[in-house]
Image (cartoon, rainbow, N blue to C red):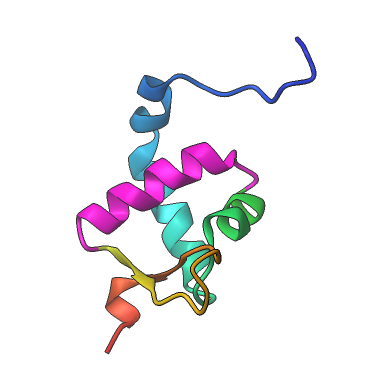
Amino acid sequence: MTGKAYLRNLGEVLRDELYERDRVAAALRGGPKTVPELAAALHAPAPEVTKWVMAMRRYGRVRDLPKARSEDYYRYQLAEETP
């Protein structure tokens, strides 16, 4: 294997979505996080975390918070924690 990180194929990532959704939710219970912060907390590649977070966002389980600057990362929060 080369120095590049191993990335799984999309089918594998999506197969694990239900399990990973619970892990993402648990990480977000500690407060809003960016995708890089979630990736570090879950010890998972950021591209995979992005897919899981976007699926959760699509189905209303998480929401993105306003950004202070346009170049900042979005921070995500569990939807059930929003007023």
Q: Does the magenta stretch include residue 47?
A: yes
Which residue occupies the foreground of this view, 6 or 70?
A: 70
Q: Residue at x 51, y 77 (%)?
A: 31
Residue lying farthest to the front in this orientation = 70
Q: Nearer the viewer, residue 58 or 26?
A: 58
Residue at image position (39%, 75%) is 65
Q: Position of residue 76 (x, y in %)?
A: 43, 67
For residue 70, above or below residue 3: below
Residue farthest to the right? 3
Residue 19's quadrant in the figure? Answer: top left
Q: Farthest top residue?
A: 1
| Residue 63 placement, left or right of 12 | left
Q: In this view, does 33 lie to the left or right of 56?
A: right
Q: Where is residue 78 in the image (x, y as percent from the top left)?
A: 36, 71
As drawn, 43 above or below 24: above
Position of 40 with respect to 53 (left or right) is: right
Q: Quadrant of residue 20?
A: top left
Q: Position of residue 27 (x, y in %)?
A: 52, 64
- Residue 33's x, y, as percent? 53, 67
Q: Which region is colored magenta? A: 43-60
